[in-house]
Amino acid sequence: MIDREQVLHIARLARLRLDDQEVERMAAELSGILEHVEAIGELDLEGVEPTTHVVALENVLRADVPAPSLDRERALAGAPDSASGSFRVPSPQA
Amino acid sequence: MSAELVPTIGLEIHVQLLTRTKMFCGCELEFGAEPNVHTCPVCLGHPGTLPVPNEQAIESAIRIAVALGCEVAPRSGFHRKNYFYPDLPKGYQISQFDVPLATAGRLGGVRIHRVHLEEDAAKLSHVGETGRIHGSGASLVDFNRGGTPLVEIVTEPDIDDPAAAREWLALLRTTLRQLGVSDVNMEEGSLRCDANVSIRPAASPELGVKTELKNMNSFRYLERGVEAEIARQREIVESGGAVEQETLHFDPAGGTLTPLRSKEYAHDYRYFPEPDLAPVAPSAAAVDAARASLPELPEQRRDRYEADLGLKPEVARRLAFDASLAAFFEEAVTAGSASAPAALANWITGDLVALARERGLEPAATAATPAAVAALVGLLAAGEVNRGGAREVLEVLVRDGGEPAAIVDRLDLGAGDPDELAAIVKRAIEEDADAAAKVRAGEGKAIGALVGAVMRETRGKADGGEVTRLIREQLDL
């Protein structure tokens, strides 16, 4: 069971502001998801490798060869604010 | 009386790899470029983009791992380390977690816990106060650095004092430089070091609560930061308090430590496997090939200097662990076929390093060439100049360069012709029969008067040992 405190902690880590109703709802939904996943625990998975990919690939690499970068104006175009060729943000620790 | 408290130090080192492009995209790496000229949708974290690892970065990381004597995992993967910070556009850093690239190595008596690959964050400049993170209003983000391949090296807590931490980091830097995988420049940030520090009563088998120190961006700051933190922890423990686990930021200006992140949320990174990247699975053959292609590393070089060249352990270590000094020494050994490597090593690590330091230089950056230093040590060994004279010649070499034999002549420092010296010794014995008789009678100290007379006669240029030898010879002792 996910409790209120855990929901608030996760919400804070994810920078989400939840009102009381949403906290209640999330606690119930997250608990439901965990219960669903826990069903796997009923299976005997001794010796079964965890699957993180649906296709069995490995060493998908690229050569160390430069590719063109974005024009700076384009790179900055999507930024809410910019200055001196840089993205400008509120200071993280102000 | 309180029990003795001993410090325990572990280091976490980040090394920027010297590849042409970033870890997961083809943007070029260039230190000191105009801000944000090397970015693309991948390293800016645009939705829907996919990372592809840089083959060269993985090769370099494997090279580091085998040089540190690690076991390379046959199969490792990438994870997402989740946290929000403006230098991290995706909201997570791609790193390695439960199965790192390599584990269980050793360098210079310190065990290596793990070696893993990750991507660097962007560079944040804080507008307003310079240098310090706290209290500034706005920040500028430059994503040129974002996505640079990084190797993180984590040691076991095997270091027990700040000076040893500094020395070990210097050994690691030389090792990495020898591998040619990084610029390893602390000022430019291509080598960065954090330290985990704790203290405990000497008798306690369990380590104390550790703190993590950041921002020690020079060898001196590492030593000073760790010293300051040990002192801070001692004070807490000795006054009956408990050290809290936290991350501290070292301010070199004041030598002070301030808490960096809210500890409540620190280290809650919710790692999970990176679904966009396939595992890294180097073949055993590739790992063997990396091991076979390693150059001579500092520790091997130290062993060779001791075993083959007969250097004292401390001198061998000082030369071998300093890439530039070792290169100077080896060139001098090659040039000076006549002089003994041990004497050369002593002159290089002793007088030459000291004279160069007076000018704020490394020996290689002075006017003294390895060949000239070798020639000088050769003159000394042949008795053509004494130790004091040789030191004077070395001063000239460091300042102006030149040819030692010519400098000896110009400054009239030559010990002179051996026959001439024998004649001077003979005269000194004749002129002080009293002292000669005492020496003959076994009064060792009396020889000083004779040596002194000879040195006066030669204006200090004769070799003291040689003079003593000649006196004893002529007195049939």
Image: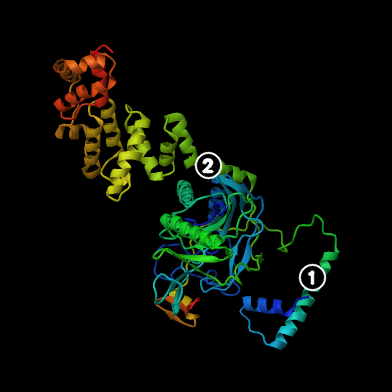
Report the residue at 57% width, 44% height from top: B69
Mark 1: few/some/many CA within 10 Å (<14, 14-19, 20+) = few
Residue B32, image x, y percentages: 39, 64
Report the residue at 62% width, 66% height from top: B80
| Quadrant in the picture for residue B440 | top left
Residue B352, image x, y percentages: 30, 41
Badge 2 amino acid: Ser
Vertical placement of B66 versus A49: above or below? above
Q: Please name the residue that numbered disc 1 is placed on.
A: A37
Mark 2: which secondary structure? loop
Badge 1 amino acid: Val
In the picture, measured across the screen, residue B330 lies left or right of residue B367, that is right
Observer-nearest of A31 and B244: B244
Report the residue at 56% width, 42% height from top: B291
Observer-nearest of A76 and B155: B155
Report the residue at 65% width, 60% height from top: B278
In the picture, measured across the screen, residue B268 lies left or right of residue B475, that is right
In the picture, measured across the screen, residue B389 lies left or right of residue B153, that is left
Q: Identify the mark at residue B452; answer none if there is no mark.
A: none
**Real-space CA distance between mark 2 and mark 1, rounded to the nearest whole angstrom:** 48 Å
* Residue B51 visible in the snapshot: no
| Quadrant in the picture for residue B394 | top left
| Quadrant in the picture for residue B310 | top left
Residue B42, image x, y percentages: 55, 69
* Residue A82 visible in the snapshot: yes
Q: Please name the residue that numbered disc 2 is placed on.
A: B293
Q: Chain of mark 2?
A: B
Residue B462, image x, y percentages: 20, 26
Mark 2: few/some/many CA within 10 Å (<14, 14-19, 20+) = few
